[in-house]
Image (spheres, helix red, strand yellow):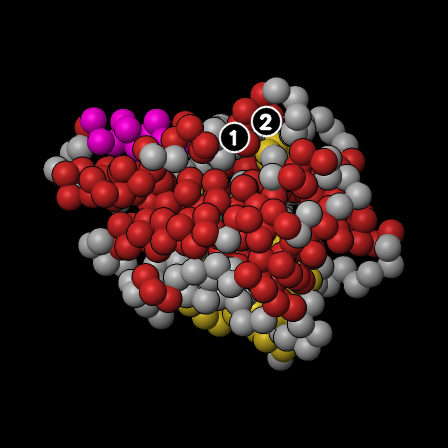
Amino acid sequence: MPKVQDKLRSLMQKFNVYGDFLVGVPFGNGHVNDTFRITYDQGGVRLNYVLQRINKEVFKEPEKVMENIDRVTAHILKKIRAAKMETRKRTVRLLRTPDDKPYAVDDDGNYWRVYIFVERARAYDVLETPEQAFGIAKAFGEFQQQLTDIPGGRLHETIPDFHNTPQRIQQLKDAIARDPLGRAGEVQKEIDFVLEREEEAGILVRLNASGDIPERITHNDTKSNNILIDDLSGEGICVIDLDTVMPGLSLYDFGDMVRTCTSPAEEDELDLRKVYMRFEMYDALFAGFCEAAGSFMTPAEKEHLATSGKIITLEIGTRFLADYINGDTYFKIKRPQHNLERCRAQFQLVRSIESQMNDMMKLL
Ligand code: GN1
Ligand code: MG
């Protein structure tokens, strides 16, 4: 058996899992962690797991990430059971180690965890129908709803200022000032695009500081592919990738859905003519989110749903741009200009959102 398989097998053996290791293959499209799908033979039945290495450069305190996830999944599981819904697919479940930890540390000090694989459901990078957008927004809205009464105090802020847009712009400025690879000069147009919107970019943070928008427990990485859609029912059934679940604003989650659910193109689309906001997708997101989160959202939150789509799309584009200038140290890339391409696609989407802002506001 090749070395990688040996390594994966020995990692799996650190967890309470029965049967025989068959094989592990790289899995998913995450930009940060390393993910494998692991297949076991358990008494003649094949069962899949998701094994993940937590990126320690990004998550400096992996124990705190895991403590958050542990609390969040336990709470959601309780809710699902109370509602007499099937528990098998509706939340991610962590395997534990013999000393009852939800993670294991390898010889190199890397943190690993294992989830039970949810079968007959999949994640979409690009959505096909408004029904999917509705289902995703409803599922992320319900997720926020489920966490409104999580006991045990405030969750850890595992990446401070994660969605602090002005801070993200400051990080871009720092990158420009250092400019380690001399790339800043070639992206002046993109830099200007951000600076022209700098004042508006701080709106969500300001609304929070003034007390108009409350802190909640939010997911903070609500990409379309962080919801599993049931193959049979088409329902958004399971929220995944709980790494950044922490205190945040409801609008961060809605905003990132607008970024990832409305365009018919991939996040790194090169042909910018293909990147735009499909209004019917926004409409469906709006309806799905209001259905699930409408009961607890404040008027100020509702009023800024449309704006959040623009701000979060701008913010993630800004992060791609800063990472490009920094020499691609944060996001995984597949091509030399990958981060710049991602940035350009985000900014194109911002333009499209801006041109439809009046219609978006009318949905209120
Ligand atoms: C990263 O790991 P992944 O691909 O789910 C990033 C998000 C970005 C996203 C852009 C911890 O998410 O914040 O929005 O890439 N996660 C972290 O696609 O930085
Ligand atoms: Mg993630």
Whether residue 56 appears in this view of the structure is: no
* Residue displayed at 27% across by 27% down: 174
* Residue displayed at 57% across by 46% down: 306
* Residue displayed at 41% across by 43% down: 314
Mark 1, Cα crowd under 10 Å, few <14 / some 14-19 / many 20+, is: some
As drawn, 155 above or below 293 = above
**Which element is circle 2 on?**
helix
Q: Amino acid at mark 2?
A: Leu
Q: x, y (%) of residue 344? A: 31, 52
Instruction: Tell me which segment is drawn in magenta.
Output: 168-177
**Which element is circle 1 on?**
helix
Q: x, y (%) of residue 347? A: 36, 49
Whether residue 198 appears in this view of the structure is: yes
Confirm whether the magenta stretch covers residue 176: yes
Please name the residue that numbered disc 1 is placed on. 203
Q: Amino acid at mark 1?
A: Ile
202 or 330, which is in the foreground?
202
Mark 2, Cα crowd under 10 Å, few <14 / some 14-19 / many 20+, is: some
Q: Decide: marks 2, 1 in contact (CB < 8 A)?
A: yes
Confirm whether the magenta stretch covers residue 137: no
Please name the residue that numbered disc 2 is placed on. 207
In the picture provided, is 322 more to the left or to the right than 243?
Answer: left
In the picture provided, is 39 more to the left or to the right than 363?
Answer: left
As drawn, 221 above or below 162 = below
- Farthest residue toward the top? 210
As drawn, 124 above or below 16 = below
How much space separates mark 2 and mark 1, taking CA atoms?
A: 6 Å
Q: x, y (%) of residue 58? A: 40, 38
